[in-house]
Amino acid sequence: MKLKKISILLLLAVFAAALSPVQTNAQGLTAEDVVKLESVGSVAMSPDGNHVAYTLSVPRTEDDDVGRNFSELYIIPADGGNAINVIEKPNGAGSPQWGPDGRLYFTSRISDHHSQTQVYSVNRSGDDLQKHTDAINGISSYQWTEDGSTIAYTSLDPVSDERKEMEERGFDMIVAGENIRYMGLYVQTRNGNATRITPDGLYVYDFSWAPSGEQLAVRVSEKTGADAEQMYTRYSVINRDGSGMRDLMDQPMKKTSISWSPDGTKLAVIAGKVYSDPLPQRLWVLNADGSGNRDLTPDNWEGTIEWAGWQDNRTLFFTAVERSVTTLNSLRIDREGITRILGGGDEIFRGISLNERKNAFAASVNTKFHPNEVFVVNNLRRPNFERITHHNDWLADKVFGEQTSITWPGADDLEIEGVLVKPVNYREGTRYPMVILPHGGPEGVSLNGWITRALYPAQVLANEGYVVFEPNYRGSGGRGTAFASANHRDLGGKEFEDVLLGIDHLDEMGLIDPERVGMSGTSYGGYFSAWAATRFSDRFAATITFAGLSNWISFMGTTDIPHEMSVVHWDLYWFDNPGQNWERSPVAWLNHADTPMLVAHGLADDRVHPEQSIQLHQFLEMKEIPTGLVLYPREPHGLTERAHQLDFMDRVLSWFNHYLK
């Protein structure tokens, strides 16, 4: 009787284990959950630190028209409480900024006010809506002077009357180099008319008022387009009447934001180290009179700076990605060394909004368990994050796969880090199928926070019983210029070996079944997926590529970033070494491939042209390798529409469940 009882118990245990995937699906995250997630975007703390304004990305429902998420605007007390809805769908809002008059300013396109995006404001109660600009073609970005008397904004050149007339007659040809539209900079006193202060033929990408209100710093270029924005801009200073423009930094390399010192003598900017630096990730200080520039970032510091602002005339705050976490730091411009203020833990934040006294701030923060919410730090002397919004409370009822950051020795024993998610209801000693989700770029980075979205459905896959692995291979951000440049002239080489060695590491841990490994990535991550299924077909059971590169030579002829891709990623133009570009192309290895590959792409993609996926799929069919092709109308370099997101996630699960399970 005793033996019989034990046998029955064993059978019950086996039966319960067999049922566990069904139980997991009822508890974990699903594709339907992903498309209803709300997420905080821009955050602005009021000068007195008592209120926080923020935008909220609100997904469309089945009842809404097809389109992107709505962007609503809220005001909430900094100590928590009820949020005031200032702008709600179907209207949208962006770029919240507090004025010295205590009003909240923002951009919006309110249909009964103007057909284009303009600057509006409300009081702290969300009432008394006022419109402040009337730009014919709408505005892109704006900023008030410190005294609130004058606004500067950028606006794209309108289409000329002559061009409109030609188009109405059917002469709507698109000719390279013709009908170029530039982004101009305009200045307008509070009750006056707007005046364009930058010359024709100059594109303004960023700008910032000097504390005096008499000058503006600008990031500009005579060139337009994604390549120009990323590689060929310069920092300059211009008087508010458009006179006296002078350059401060004009060497070609990646550049981004601008911040004036309180005394108006210096500018803090974030730029690359050299022309081939893959990211604008170093903190520079430029003298406003043009007398000198300094890169303050220590060469031995492994981090990627993303936001910077002044505490006083000698001290800078900056946020950074350091491996798979984020930090807030300070740096003296007259001393060496970086001081960490907070971060390095579960809270992931990419920038902050300080109060006027610069002793408190608000930020958009995510963790492993929720997307971006509003958090505040009320005292920088004793910094501690406090969450004040809760937009996805239903997530508390969900079960998540355990998520951690791991390291392993990559190629040449270089330490590589990544994010690992175990299956929901993971059982020790069980080997699971694995899906690798490589980030794009390749200078992107996977952070150990909220990582689940339509194109990277990490916790959805964990809920289906997969180990999910997001490797930060060499070439990734978050570890400084040297690491980000470590894949130069070797794309698909040692960087991919880093990933293969990561698979071996997880195999040695007894966590995965190495015969059931898949990969799904987007953009450069899509290249990794196609490369995995062709060059390394023996290592992968199935892959999915979305907006992925398949042929390096034809990609360079169709992308909107041919210089950026060549300089900061390849460090080589394809026509200087066409053999290597072809050898590292997935389509060059189809004779060695048999891995099933699903191919998907957005039809409005300018970054990676859909031809990359169309040719890959056609070649796979010709080789009789299991494949499929899904093309999404209207979608750019990503997925923005609810139905498309649901469709893609469903295909991901179906594809991997068929080939990996």
Image (cartoon, helix red, strand yellow):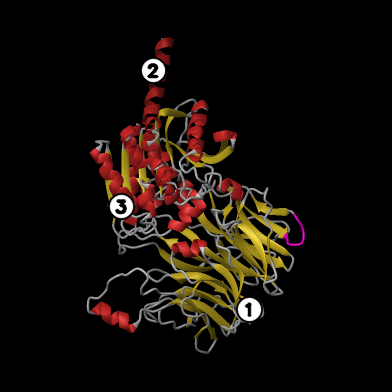
Which quarter of the rendering shows the C terminus? top left
Which quarter of the rendering shows the N terminus? top left
State the residue lying farthest toward the front.
576
The reply to whether dot 3 and dot 1 touch (C-beta < 8 Å) is: no
Dot placed on the residue nearer the N-terminal end, 2 or 1: 2
The reply to whether dot 3 and dot 2 touch (C-beta < 8 Å) is: no
User: Which amino acid, by three-letter code, is at mark 3?
Assistant: Glu
Q: CA distance from mark 2 to mark 1?
A: 77 Å
Mark number displayed over residue 8? 2
- Judged from the image, the secondary structure of the residue bearing numbered disc 2 is helix
- Residue 29, visible in the rendered structure: no
User: Which amino acid, by three-letter code, is at mark 2?
Assistant: Ile
- Residue 171, visible in the rendered structure: yes
Residue placed most toward the observer, 414 or 643: 414
The percent coordinates of residue 186 (x first, y second) are 51, 81
Query: In the displayed structure, would residue 585 be above or below residue 40?
Result: above
Mark number displayed over residue 355? none
Residue placed most toward the observer, 95 or 601: 601
Q: Nearer the viewer, mark 3 or mark 2?
A: 3
